Image (cartoon, rainbow, N blue to C red):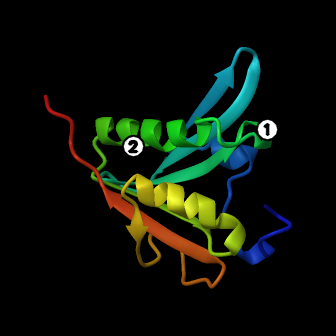
Amino acid sequence: MRSLTPLESKHALDLDGLRKPDITFWSVVDGDRLVGCGALEKLDARHAESKSMRTRPARQRSGVASTLPAHILREASGMGFTRLSLETGSAEFFLPARRLYEKFGFQPCEPFGDYRPDPNSTFMTTALCMPHA
């Protein structure tokens, strides 16, 4: 990602960022091999951000990428969030990711949280349904 996005527009979390208390992190494994990961960051009591969704390049188009947002959406709803947002790149390279997020109900939105308008970023959000008790 660093080769595609200017440093001032890079919002991916590093290892220390993923260890923050407001972060929940998931790994997708196949046997003993890590094939994907994703995280959720609590922004406030009702709003969270999907972070750091990645699929091992060798496993692209194998269903891992669809498993992650489906899981994160279910978990975010179960945690009581009513809105889930994300930031991704605006370059052509990120078009498959943006299309995947659209399939899960994400729509373009204005910058949220601490983000500011950035020509290298696309911001997306979706409303979450509360689970039934």
The answer to the question of whether label 1 and label 2 lie on touching residues, with beta carbons closer than 8 A, is no
What's the CA distance linking mark 1 and mark 2?
25 Å
Against 78, is 69 above or below? below
Q: What amino acid is at disc 2?
A: Leu
Q: Is residue 10 visible?
A: no
Residue 74 figure quarter: top left
Q: Secondary structure at mark 1?
A: helix
* Residue in the foreground of this view, choosing between 70 and 130: 70
Q: Is residue 7 visible?
A: yes
Chain-order first, disc 1 or disc 2: 1
Q: What amino acid is at disc 1?
A: Ala
Q: Crowding near pointer 2: few (<14 within 10 Å), some, many (20+)?
A: many
Residue 57 figure quarter: top right
Q: Secondary structure at mark 2?
A: helix
**Residue hosting label 1:** 58
- Direction from residue 46 to residue 14 in the image, left or right: right
Q: Position of residue 27 (x, y in %)?
A: 63, 30
| Tag nearer the camera, 1 or 2 | 1
* Residue at the spot 28% in from the left edge and 50% down from the top edge: 128
